[in-house]
C-alpha cells in the first residue's frame, strides 16, 4: 500500500502599511508576529494610503501567497479602505485559494459565508473612513465659524491638535490629506507633531500623494 504524504501546512504571509514614511510599523510588525507570521515573511508599504492599490509591498505579499497559505493583516483598513478595492483583493485571494486573517479572525473567501463576512467588514471599514472625514470637516467648519465670531484664535485648539496628531500617528492620512482636513498649513502640522513628542516629517522627503481610488 502506497503511503501518501500529508499536505504541507500553509504559510502565514504578513502585510503592514502606514500612510507616510515617518510613521512607525513596529506595532503592526509585532502584531503580525504574534499572529504567527515569521519576520522574514512580512511585506510592508510606507507612504501609501489604503485607497491606493498600486502598493509594491502588497503586490509582493500577494505574489508570495500560494494555495493553502493565509494572508495576515492586523486590521482590514491596513489592507483596503474602500469596498471595491477589498472586493478586488478578495477575488484575487479566491483565485489563489488563499485565506485571510484579520487580527486573528480567519476568513475563507472561497466559502460563501466567509466572503459575505469579508464584504461586510469592508463596508464597515469604508464607512468608518468616510465618517472620520465627514466629522473632521464638520468640526473644522464649526471651529472656523467660531473663530470669525470671537476674533483671532489659535490656528488649532488643544482638542483639534490632539485629533490631528492622533490621525497622523494612526497612519490613516498623509500630511497633505491633513492639510485638507484641517484649515492649517503644513508647517503648523509639523509643529503640532513635534509638540506631541513625535518626529516631524521632512517636507522634502514626504511621499508623493497617490490618486484616491474609491471613497476610502
Image: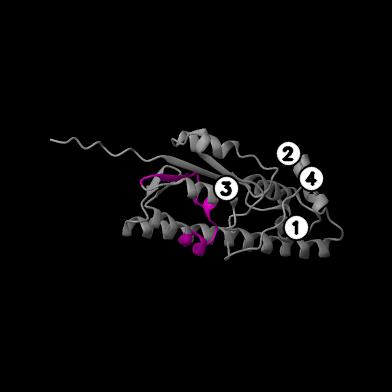
Question: In x, y percent, where is residue 49?
Answer: 62, 54
Measured in 3D between alpha carbons, the distance from the residue under mark 3 to the one under mark 2, in whole angstroms, is 25 Å
Image point 81% across, 50% down: which residue? 188
Image point 77% across, 42% down: which residue? 200
Label 2 element class: loop
The circle on residue 179 is 1
User: Sequence-wise, which precedes: disc 1 or disc 4?
Assistant: 1
User: Sequence-wise, which precedes: disc 1 or disc 2?
Assistant: 1
Q: Taking 1 as reference, is 99 above or below it?
A: below
Question: In x, y percent, where is residue 159?
Answer: 71, 49
Disc number lying in front (3 or 2): 3
Query: On the picture, is 84 further left or further right than 162?
Result: left
CB atoms of marks 4 and 2 within 8 Å: no
Image point 26% across, 37% down: which residue? 6
Question: What residue does disc 2 label?
Answer: 198
User: Sequence-wise, which precedes: disc 3 or disc 4?
Assistant: 3
Measured in 3D between alpha carbons, the distance from the residue under mark 4 to the one under mark 2, in whole angstroms, is 12 Å
Question: What residue does disc 4 label?
Answer: 202
Image point 37% across, 60% down: which residue? 116
- Residue 82 magenta-drawn? yes
Label 3 element class: helix
Question: In x, y percent, where is residue 61?
Answer: 51, 47
The circle on residue 57 is 3
The circle on residue 80 is none
CB atoms of marks 1 and 3 within 8 Å: no
Amino acid at each position: 500500500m502506497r503511503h501518501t504524504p500529508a499536505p504541507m501546512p500553509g504559510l502565514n504571509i504578513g502585510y503592514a502599511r502606514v500612510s507616510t514614511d515617518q510613521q512607525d510599523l513596529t506595532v503592526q510588525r509585532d502584531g503580525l508576529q504574534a499572529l504567527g507570521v515569521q519576520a522574514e515573511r512580512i511585506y510592508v508599504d510606507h507612504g501609501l494610503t489604503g485607497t491606493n492599490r498600486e502598493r509594491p509591498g502588497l503586490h509582493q505579499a500577494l505574489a508570495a501567497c500560494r494555495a493553502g497559505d493565509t494572508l495576515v493583516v492586523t486590521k482590514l483598513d491596513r489592507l483596503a479602505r474602500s469596498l471595491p478595492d477589498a472586493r478586488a483583493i478578495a477575488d484575487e485571494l479566491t483565485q489563489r485559494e488563499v485565506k485571510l486573517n484579520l487580527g486573528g479572525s480567519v476568513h475563507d473567501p472561497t466559502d460563501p459565508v466567509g466572503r459575505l463576512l469579508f464584504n461586510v467588514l469592508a463596508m464597515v471599514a469604508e464607512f468608518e473612513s468616510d465618517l472620520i472625514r465627514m466629522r473632521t470637516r464638520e468640526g473644522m467648519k464649526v471651529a472656523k465659524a467660531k473663530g470669525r465670531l470671537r476674533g483671532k484664535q489659535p490656528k488649532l485648539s488643544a482638542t483639534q491638535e490632539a485629533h490631528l496628531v492622533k490621525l497622523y500617528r494612526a497612519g490613516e492620512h498623509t500630511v497633505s490629506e491633513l492639510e485638507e482636513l484641517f484649515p492649517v498649513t503644513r508647517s503648523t502640522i509639523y509643529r503640532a507633531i513635534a509638540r506631541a513628542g513625535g518626529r516631524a516629517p521632512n517636507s522634502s522627503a514626504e511621499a508623493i500623494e497617490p490618486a484616491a481610488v474609491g471613497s476610502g
